[in-house]
Amino acid sequence: MTLSVAIIGSGPAGFYTADAIVKKFADVQVDVIDRLPTPFGLLRAGVAPDHQGSKKIGRVFERTAQRDNVHFIGNVEIGRDVSLAELREIYDAVVIATGAPKDRGLTVEGADKKNVIGSSRFVGWYNSHPDFASLDVDVDVESVVIIGVGNVALDCARILALTPEELAASDIAPHAEARINAAHIKDIHVVGRRGPVEATFTHKEVSELGELARTVPLVARHKIPDNADACPPEERKGKEANLALLRGYADNTRDMKPIGLSLHFYVQPVEILGGERVEAVRFERTRVEPDGRCVGIGEFVEIPAGLVITCIGYQSIPLEGAPYDERRGLFRNDDGRIEPGLYCTGWAMRGPTGTIATSAPDAEAVARHIAEDVPNPGKPGAKALIGLLEERDAKLVSYEDWQKIDAAERAAARERPSPRRKFVRIGDMLNVVSKS
Ligand SMILES: Cc1cc2nc3c(=O)[nH]c(=O)nc-3n(C[C@H](O)[C@H](O)[C@H](O)COP(=O)(O)OP(=O)(O)OC[C@H]3O[C@@H](n4cnc5c(N)ncnc54)[C@H](O)[C@@H]3O)c2cc1C
């Protein structure tokens, strides 16, 4: 009998898992379901629009999607169009690969002021995610504060710092491009509560800051440790390389370019200041204790800010019928197994850490668990799901439909090297499908 597997979410974790499953089982049908008409999750809507090289891994997922025994079913949200319980009735195994799309909130006073915004919304806005097309974010401010010192924080900073010429080569959302090009930003402050060794940004992202046309990276020399001995030996080489870059940036001066991008370390936000709208952020200086704890030291500084972007992590959105760990913001699981027949993978399993490739081993584990747990497959799978969705008048998007959307986006690119002009509204994507 054919094993039927439904994967909820078509991001990197979903496609790695589909690939691992079709390689493990001789007779299997895998359906990869996504709430959007477009596949690939954060590869499309997270990875920065000027980082087209990082998107090349998508070719691997495209190959998986085109296998005879893998089907993409887009524009179907589990929990809205079909329940998880219904899906489990229909499929031998169900894998949750829904990522971690919700911002972890900043819990300081004033965090609800206007123009304080989480990075998942800000990134979704500049990357044409349909959920955030109408987001009202004002980037025409003199000073921006970005809270967090990981790669997402540096992505947000860099996108605001790029010139119109640099942005023209990307596939940034037209609405975001227009606003960023018209803005008069002078200073971008990227702020972390710990030091440069603890910061999670990677060498490539830090080095790009030194190559921006109109923006100069700045850092106070006394905040840069002499060495990276505080971190585990396997990370030391990479961290030393980051410190060397930062030492170079410490020689820069604010007058070198029109925009200053300042990296601040050992400060934590304690209050967002202003009226209805943010005007500044108050920070407390910190110290990292020998046991790794970060503690405030009772000295305070204020940084002016007309826009604050928080990049302090993400959490998964619970699905009725799947046990959820509120504290960690992910599905309760043991190495990807929630219970026999129900699994999770990628950010929904591990939380928001690591790169795209980090999800590949998670996928192998899920395929192994399914082999152990489902000795007697035979549930109907796709046929039953599609019947159910048709009864409910859902407008399914197949992989072939997505290829039409993809072709229309590529054709609409302004000019090379911009790869595509993304649709931002689901209705416009569905129009392409229904017209063809
Ligand atoms: C801003 C940003 C930039 C990044 N840049 C890079 C980079 O340059 N290089 C790199 O290696 N990594 C990068 N990453 C990390 C990388 O994107 C993640 O490791 C990876 O996307 C996680 O994959 P995932 O499949 O678990 O989740 P996601 O990619 O988030 O995929 C989840 C999918 O599930 C779908 N979904 C959610 N809920 C439902 C539902 N109820 N029903 C149906 N479908 C649903 C979503 O629409 C989405 O398509 C970046 C991350 C962020 C946030």
Image (tube, rainbow, N blue to C red):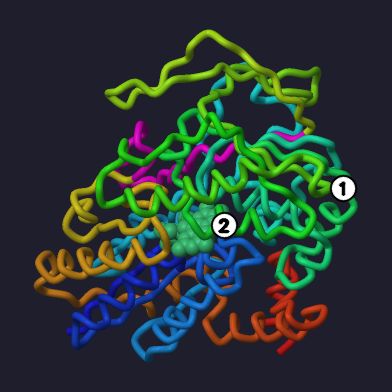
Q: Residue at x 40, y 63 (%)?
A: 8
- Number of marks drawn: 2
Which residue is the extreme one toward the top? 298
Examine the residues drawn in magenta and state their main secondary structure.
loop
Element at label 2:
helix
Q: Using the image, determine if residue 355 lies above or below residue 217.
A: below
Q: Position of residue 177 (x, y in %)?
A: 80, 59
Mark earlier in primary sequence (1, 2): 1
The front one of 194 and 137 is 194
Q: Nearer the viewer, residue 121 or 331?
A: 121
- Please name the amino acid that badge 2 sits on: Ser
Q: Is mark 1 within 8 Å of ligand 1?
A: no
- Image disc number at residue 207: 2
Residue situated in front as seen by the camera: 324 or 49: 49
Q: Residues within 10 Å of mark 2 (few under 14, many from 20)?
A: some
Magenta residue span:
307-330
In this rendering, would 293 be left or right of 209? left
- The structure residue drawn at horizontal position 14% and vertical position 69%, both measured from the top left corner, is 374
Q: Is residue 196 left or right of residue 146?
A: left
Residue type marked 1:
Ala
Q: Is residue 97 left or right of residue 341?
A: right
What residue would you read off at disc 1? Answer: 183
Q: Is residue 329 magenta?
A: yes
Which residue is painted at 27% across and 62% down in the image?
A: 362
Note whether residue 428 is visible: yes
Question: How many residues crowd mark 1 within 10 Å: few (<14), some (14–19), many (20+)?
Answer: some
Q: Under tag 1, what secondary structure? A: loop
Instruction: Pinpoint residue 396: horizontal percent, then vertical percent.
Output: 56, 74
Disc 1/disc 2 C-alpha distance (Å): 25 Å
Percent x, y of residue 81: 51, 59
Residue at position x 74%, y 55% in the image: 133
Does 57 lie within the magenta span? no
